[in-house]
Image: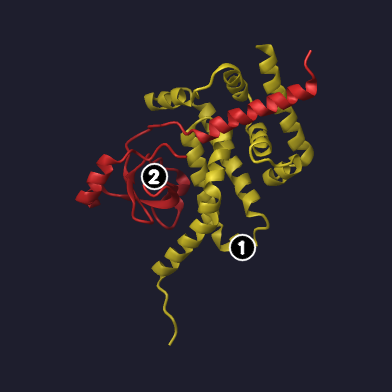
Amino acid sequence: MGLTITPVTVQASEEAAFESAVVAAHAERLLRLALAVVDDPGEAQDAVQETLLVAWRHWPSWARLANPSAWLTRVCVRQCVRRRRRLQRRVFWSPGQWAVARAQVPELDGRLLDLHRAYRHLSPSQRAVLYLHLQEGLTVESCAGQLGIRPGTARSHLGRALSKLRKELLDV
Amino acid sequence: MSDPGSLDEEVKQMARDYLDHRTRRVALFYLGPRPVVRCRRGHVFTTTWVWGGSLKGIRLGPLRFQHCPVGNHWTLVHRVPYSEVTEEEARSLAAQHPDVPIP
């Protein structure tokens, strides 16, 4: 007599496997990355959710991914870029969105506040490379691998990002 | 005049501090009504639910992944109609803080 597995059981076990391999292993890291790339925490959270949903759709072929972490990073940054563009297109803000903007100003002082102003002028790609390099400690080559870009491009993003930050700090 | 190398290091260190601050802190945000959701471990909490096209398209029905503040874990959650919230859960909801901040 064969073992009967109901669809509900299969779905539940797949969900558990997915949560363990993807959500538990990567969600926190992706959220930090998204928070570095987009200015709105809600958008960052949604970018991570979208990333996880894309991953869920790819779950049947997950084992074939050569580097799941890099794949997730690329998807997450892409989601952040989409959301950032959408945010920039908004002209009129609702009261709720003003609350978001107000909440966005971190409790920074002195030169970190100057850095915060300069950071707002960095592109999503520059932010992503800066975050991966400085916070995750990746080499420029690894950053490029994670983002699916050439090392020279990653080096250029990092150099320009640091240059903008340096300029802001020196100008003050 | 300061050494360009040490200035670069100083800028990098400041950028590290800034990114650490920025990514650790998730600001409170309120963009709409806060529905009740239940995570896979059965925890019930309120959240901000923003529908997206892809969320509607998923075959599993209404769900999303997010941080559960009750169990302090990332999980898949389902919306729960208020009519299905038990009395005990309602008391718990009233007592607990909302789902933010996320670590």
| Chain corresponding to yellow in the figure | A
Residue drawn at point x = 68 percent, y = 58 percent: A66
Which lettered chain is shown in red?
Answer: B
Give the residue pinned by disc 2.
B69
Indicate the position of residue A98 as horizontal and vertical percent values: 42, 23
> Quarter of the image containing the N terminus of chain B?
top right
Q: Nearer the viewer, residue B12 or B80?
A: B12
* Number of callouts: 2
Disc 1 marks which residue?
A63
**For residue A47, side relative to residue A153 (left or right):** left
Image position of B68 (left or right of A65): left
**Crowd class of label 1 (few under 14; some 14 to 19; many from 20; radius 10 Å):** few
Type of amino acid at the residue the image marks with label 1 = Ala
How many angstroms separate mark 1 from mark 2 (CA)?
A: 30 Å
Q: Position of residue B68 (x, y in %)?
A: 40, 47
Chain of the residue where label 2 is placed in the rendered structure: B
Tell me which amino acid carries mark 2.
Pro
- Mark 2 residue crowding within 10 angstroms, few (<14) / some (14–19) / many (20+): many
**Quick one: A10 or A107, which is closer to the camera?**
A107
Relative depth, front residue between A67 and B24: B24
Secondary structure found at label 1: helix
Q: Identify the residue at horizontal 22%, vertical 52% (top origin).
A: B86
Is any atom of residue A38 visible in this view?
Answer: no
